[in-house]
Amino acid sequence: MAIMRKPDLSTPDTPGTTDTSGSPVAVRPWLRYGATAAAVAATAVVGARAVDPDSSWYKSLRTPAWQPPSAAFGLVWTPLYATVAYAGGRALGGVRDRRERRHVAASLAGNLALNASWNWLFFGLRSPRAGLAGTVLLDLSNLELLRRLARTDRTAGRALLPYAGWCLFATALNASIARRNPSSHLTTIQA
């Protein structure tokens, strides 16, 4: 005769876990990781639509000697986006309270929106200054997201550190480009 064991409902990955109000909070791992991966992929696609490193406008910009080659950006962003998807999925799985999970999801969504918007501000508007404003906002969002995720799940917070570090590097690069190209702003957009 087989002995039936009571299911362990103590982990957030277990269907049936509830918050203090009795509302279900567990989200299956494949669903939360799939959702964060889809959101990150959408961010990458939306942002990439604005990027044109071969444009005459971009090639005319004076850039610092320490700027990586264009090909390096895709090589760096691919694993960084993967860590954002992982960190978001992991953090969402570690939140038992529905309200806090909404805050984590909103912080992640806002961060991804700022991430994609940088490409449109810099390349789409052909404005290093607008790009700089966007990347500074992204850095602030990164700090908020890191704080929130680290409070929820330290591993998720640590997973975001390379992403936040690269964004700080991108801010320094963008600031250098804006400083070297003071006349390259919104009025330089050509039809």
Image (cartoon, grey):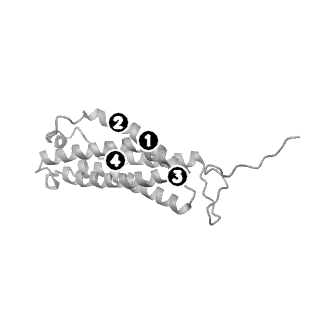
Disc with the residue nearer the chain's start (3 vs 4): 4
Which residue occupies the foreground of this view, 106 or 52?
Answer: 106
Dot 3 corresponds to which residue?
92
In the picture shown, does residue 117 fall above or below 66? below
Instruction: Give the quadrant of the N terminus.
Output: top right
In the rendering, at what x and y percent does residue 7 appear?
73, 49
Q: Is residue 150 left or right of residue 61?
A: right
Q: In the rendered structure, find residue 83 and report the number of the disc placed on it.
A: 1
Measure how far apart labels 3 and 1 are at the Cα level.
14 Å
- Nearer to us of marks 4 and 2 is 2
In the rendering, at what x and y percent does residue 176 appear?
17, 44
Dot 4 corresponds to which residue?
47
Disc with the residue nearer the chain's start (3 vs 1): 1
Disc with the residue nearer the chain's start (3 vs 2): 2
- Three-letter residue code for mark 3: Leu
Measure how far apart labels 4 and 2 are at the Cα level.
15 Å
- Three-letter residue code for mark 2: Val
